[in-house]
C-alpha cells in the first residue's frame, strides 16, 4: 500500500464481510457473485465482531440463521454442489463448541471437493484474558485452540492475529475456493478481539474481483496416447463421476459415448450425468452397482474415468476391474485423482477434454464394434427389467425400501431432486432411482455423513427453488440431525422429507452380522431389565408428529 493510496477504516470483521460481497466468479462468460450469503450462529466469540459487521452490511451480504453449526455447513455444501461449485456460502461461528460443530461439515465438503468458507471465532490473540470461556488450554502451546483441528479437513487454513493479515489471507482463500482442482473447505480463524480491531485498509481491496474458471485441456501428446488406447480397446467402458456434472459436461459425455460406442457406468456423484434410459447408460458401478455396469467393467480392457476419485465403492475395493490387460485413462481437473490406478492422466476440464478426445478418436476411426454394442444393449435391457421387478415387489404388511424408492421416484417430476447421504438408502438409490436430469440425484457419498440429508435438502432447495426436493432419510440419520427443518420454515423453503424407519442402524447391523458377529448395539430398542442389554422391544417414534411439532 503506497503512502497516498485511499484507505477505508473498518474493523477486521467489517472488512471480511465487505470483501466477501465483492467476490465474483465467471465461467463460459457467465458471471455471478461467489457468495450467496453468510450462515452463522452468534456467540461471545463472534457476535461483537462478525455479528455487528453482518448487521451493518446487510445490504451487501445476506445473513441466514441456522439451528446447528454442522447443519449450516451441510446446507452451504449442498448449495455449492447444486451450483456446480460456482457459488457457495460463508459460515461464521463462535469459539469452542460452536466452532468444533463445523469440523464434520468441513470434512464433508473437503472429501467431496466442494467449496465452503468457514470463519470460526477464536480465542483472544492478545491472550488477555486467558483462558477465556470455552478455551482449550493446550499444555504444549498457548497458540493452539480447538480451531487447529480444522487443519486436516481444510484445503487452506489460517488464523488472523492482526487485522491487516486478511489482506494476504482472503485472496488465498478465494484462489483455493474457486480452483476446481484444489477446492474444498477453507478455514480462516478469527480471534474475537482481532475481529473488532480497526485498521486503515486500502480501498482497492474492496473493489469487485472476478475469479475466472478456465476450461483447460491436456497436452496434445497425452490426448494422442488416449486416442491410441481407445483404438486398441475391444471392450471399453466410461466411468462418469461428479466432475462430469460440475463441469456441465453431460452433453459432451453423451456425444462421446454415441460417437465411439462406449457404455457409461455411474458413480454416486456421477449418477444422472446421462438419463437412466440413455442407450449407452449401463447404470451404477461398484459395490452397490448393478448387473450391467458391473459385468461390463469386470471385463473391460479400457476404463476411461471422467471426473471421479475412484473410491472403494466405485472400484469395489480394487476388485471391480478383473481383465488382466485392462488399461486406464483418467480425465480429471485434479492431478492427484488423474494418476490413480496408474492411469494415463488427462489433467483438464471434463467437458473440454471429452470434446477434444472425441474429435481425435473420431478422426482415427476408433469406435467399438457393433457386437460390443449389442452386448451393452442386452445387458442394459436385462438390468432395467430387474429394476422394474425389484421396485414392484410387494410384501403383505409393510412397504420395502425399494417400494418406497419406486413410489417417490414415480411421484417426482423430471426436474425434481432426491437427496440422501448415509445408511442403506444410498446403495438402493444408486441401483433403483431413475433420474432424467443431471441435477436430479444429489447424494453425498464421499463422507457419507449421517445428518447431511435434511440440511443438505435445504441447500438444494435454496440453490434452485423451482425444483421439488425429496429428502430420503433413515430413522438413524433423521435422529442425528433434523433441526434444519425449522430453518427451512425460516427461509420459507419447502422440502419433502421421506423417513424410512427400520428402527436403527440396520445397514451396519447387516455388515456386523455378515462378518460373523451377532446383532449388537445397532437397533433402536429399549434396555431389557432382565438381560441388562439393549435387546428389548423396538422403540416406537412418531416421526410425523415430531416434524409437525417443529412447525
Image (tube, rainbow, N blue to C red):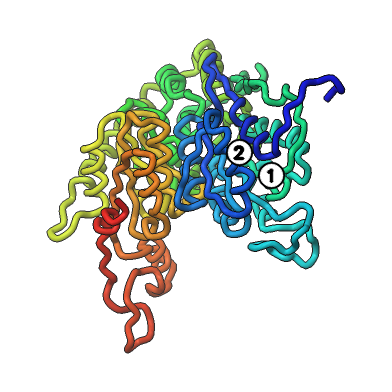
**Residue at (31%, 39%) from the top-left corner?**
494
Residue that sits furthest to the top in the current view: 363
Mark 1 nearby-residue class (10 Å; few <14, some 14–19, many ≥20)? many
Asked if the residues shown at circle 2 and circle 1 are in contact, with their CB atoms under 8 angstroms apart, the answer is yes
Residue 42: give its label: none
Q: Which residue is mark 2?
A: 53
Residue 406 locus on image (x, y percent): 23, 43
**As rendered, which of 270 and 293 lies closer to the eye?**
270
Residue 13 locus on image (x, y percent): 66, 40
397 relative to 111 in the view: left or right: left
**Residue at mark 2 to residue at mark 1: CA–CA distance:** 9 Å
**Residue at (63%, 41%) from the top-left corner?**
186
**As rendered, which of 463 and 312 lies closer to the eye?**
463
Q: Is residue 88 visible?
A: yes
Residue 432 locus on image (x, y percent): 30, 43
Residue 367 locus on image (x, y percent): 46, 19
517 relative to 128 in the view: left or right: left
Element carrying mark 2: helix
Q: Which residue is mark 1?
A: 195
Image quadrant where one finds the N terminus: top right
**Residue at (29%, 58%) from the top-left corner?**
546
Does 99 sit above or below residue 462?
below
**Residue at (61%, 20%) from the top-left corner?**
214
Q: Find residue 541 and report its image quarter.
A: bottom left
Amino acid at each position: 500500500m503506497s503512502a497516498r493510496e485511499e484507505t477505508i477504516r473498518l474493523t477486521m470483521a467489517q472488512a471480511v464481510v465487505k470483501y466477501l460481497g465483492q467476490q465474483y466468479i465467471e465461467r463460459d462468460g457467465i458471471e455471478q457473485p461467489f457468495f450467496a450469503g453468510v450462515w452463522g450462529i452468534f456467540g461471545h466469540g463472534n457476535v461483537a465482531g462478525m455479528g455487528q459487521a453482518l448487521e451493518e452490511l446487510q445490504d451487501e451480504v445476506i445473513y441466514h440463521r441456522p439451528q446447528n453449526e454442522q447443519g449450516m455447513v451441510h446446507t452451504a455444501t449442498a448449495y455449492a454442489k447444486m451450483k456446480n461449485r460456482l457459488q457457495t456460502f460463508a459460515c461464521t461461528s463462535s469459539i469452542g463448541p460452536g466452532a468444533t460443530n463445523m469440523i464434520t461439515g468441513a470434512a464433508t465438503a473437503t472429501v467431496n471437493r466442494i467449496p465452503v468458507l468457514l470463519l470460526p471465532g477464536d480465542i483472544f490473540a492478545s491472550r488477555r484474558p486467558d483462558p477465556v470461556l470455552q478455551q482449550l488450554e493446550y499444555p504444549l502451546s498457548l497458540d493452539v485452540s480447538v480451531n487447529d483441528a480444522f487443519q486436516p479437513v481444510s484445503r487452506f487454513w489460517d488464523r488472523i492475529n492482526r487485522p491487516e493479515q486478511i489482506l494476504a489471507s482472503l485472496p488465498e482463500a478465494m484462489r483455493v475456493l474457486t480452483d476446481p482442482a484444489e477446492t474444498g473447505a477453507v478455514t480462516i480463524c478469527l480471534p474475537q478481539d482481532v475481529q473488532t480491531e480497526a485498521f486503515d485498509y486500502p480501498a482497492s481491496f474492496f473493489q469487485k474481483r472476478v475469479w475466472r474458471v478456465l476450461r483447460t485441456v491436456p497436452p496434445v501428446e497425452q490426448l494422442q496416447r488416449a486416442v491410441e488406447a481407445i483404438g486398441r480397446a475391444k471392450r471399453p467402458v466410461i466411468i462418469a463421476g461428479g466432475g462430469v456434472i460440475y463441469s456441465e459436461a453431460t452433453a459432451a459425455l453423451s456425444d462421446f459415448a454415441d460417437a465411439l460406442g462406449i457404455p457409461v457406468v455411474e458413480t454416486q456423484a456421477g449418477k444422472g450425468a446421462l438419463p437412466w434410459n440413455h442407450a449407452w447408460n449401463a447404470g451404477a458401478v461398484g459395490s452397490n452397482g448393478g448387473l450391467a455396469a458391473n459385468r461390463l467393467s469386470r471385463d473391460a480392457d479400457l476404463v476411461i474415468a471422467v471426473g471421479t476419485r475412484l473410491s472403494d465403492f466405485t472400484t469395489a475395493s480394487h476388485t471391480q476391474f478383473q481383465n488382466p490387460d485392462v488399461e486406464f485413462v483418467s480425465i480429471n481437473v485434479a492431478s492427484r485423482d488423474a494418476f490413480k490406478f496408474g492411469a494415463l492422466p488427462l489433467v483438464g476440464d471434463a467437458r473440454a477434454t471429452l470434446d477434444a478426445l472425441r474429435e481425435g478418436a473420431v478422426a482415427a476411426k476408433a469406435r467399438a464394434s457393433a457386437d460390443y454394442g449389442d452386448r451393452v444393449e442386452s445387458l442394459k435391457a436385462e438390468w432395467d427389467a430387474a429394476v422394474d421387478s425389484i421396485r414392484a415387489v410387494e410384501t403383505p404388511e409393510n412397504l420395502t425400501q425399494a417400494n418406497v424408492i419406486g413410489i417417490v421416484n414415480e411421484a417426482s417430476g423430471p426436474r425434481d431432486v432426491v437427496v440422501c447421504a448415509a445408511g442403506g438408502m444410498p446403495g438402493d438409490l444408486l441401483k433403483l432411482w431413475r433420474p432424467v436430469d443431471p441435477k436430479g440425484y444429489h447424494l453425498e457419498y464421499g463422507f457419507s455423513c449421517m445428518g447431511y440429508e435434511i440440511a443438505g435438502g435445504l441447500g438444494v432447495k435454496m440453490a434452485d427453488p423451482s425444483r421439488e426436493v425429496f429428502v430420503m432419510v433413515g430413522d438413524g440419520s433423521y435422529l442425528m440431525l433434523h433441526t434444519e427443518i425449522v430453518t427451512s420454515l425460516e427461509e420459507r423453503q419447502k422440502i419433502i422429507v421421506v423417513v424410512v424407519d427400520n428402527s436403527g442402524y440396520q445397514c451396519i447391523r447387516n455388515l456386523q452380522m455378515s462378518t460373523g458377529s451377532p446383532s449388537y448395539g445397532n437397533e433402536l430398542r429399549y434396555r431389557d431389565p432382565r438381560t441388562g442389554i439393549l435387546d428389548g422391544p423396538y422403540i416406537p417414534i412418531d416421526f410425523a408428529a415430531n416434524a409437525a411439532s417443529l412447525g
